[in-house]
Amino acid sequence: MMKKLFQMVAIAILGSALTQAARTQNGRVQLKVEHADVPLYPEPARTANIFGTVEVQVTVKDGAVVNAEVKSGPPLLTRSTVENIQSWRFALHANDTFTTKFIYQVADDGDPANPRVELQLPYQVRITGVRVRLDTGSNAPPRTATH
């Protein structure tokens, strides 16, 4: 009986210690993202040169995102932001509500096919796409059709 009681107390103390170790300096539980799809810069927004910050309040229950409510941001960027957040998976015990920011930027150089993505999950994502240049000049070579 004493041995079983000792085991229960030891488990409770260990659980409490692990929870305390997972807290950040500001007292919040540090969430660890175990899976996330790579975020993309939505092509229509990049083509229209739309950039900005999307802020989303995210609720996680038992490691899964159960709600992602957009607080602010350009409408052409919000859908892909929420879709990406819904791909996030946390440790099974994770339960929290927090705000994350997706910062979309356009640059004049880089690989147009591959935006630069910087992840500081789960609190910030920065996506930099290359500015789309629409050819409006008359010096462009004529298009040829291939069959």
Image (tube, helix red, strand yellow):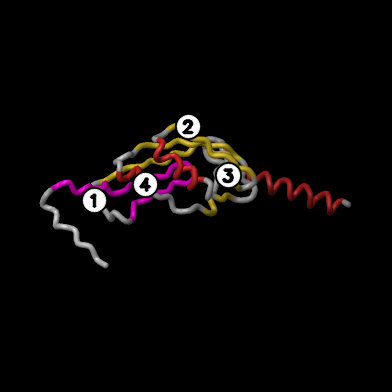
* Residue under numbered circle 4: 127
Q: Separation of disc 1 and disc 2 at Cα?
A: 31 Å
Q: Which region is colored magenta?
A: 114-137
Number of the label disc, if any, that sits on residue 109: 1
Number of the label disc, if any, that sits on residue 91: none
- Look at the image and tell me in which quarter the C terminus lies: bottom left
**On the rendered structure, is 54 left or right of 128?**
right
* Residue under numbered circle 3: 65
Q: How many marks?
A: 4
User: Could you tell which of marks 1 and 2 lies nearer the N-terminus?
Assistant: 2
Residue at point 49%, 35% (across, down) = 70
Q: What is the residue that sits farthest to the bottom in this orientation? A: 147
Q: Position of residue 55 (x, y in %)?
A: 45, 35
Circle 4 SS class: strand
* Residue under numbered circle 2: 71
Callout 1 amino acid: Asp
Q: Separation of disc 3 and disc 2 at Cα?
A: 16 Å
User: Could you tell which of marks 3 and 4 lies nearer the N-terminus?
Assistant: 3
Circle 2 SS class: strand
Q: Position of residue 4 (x, y in %)?
A: 84, 53
Residue at point 42%, 37% (across, down) = 54
Residue at point 35%, 48% (across, down) = 43
Q: Residues within 10 Å of mark 2 (few under 14, many from 20)?
A: few
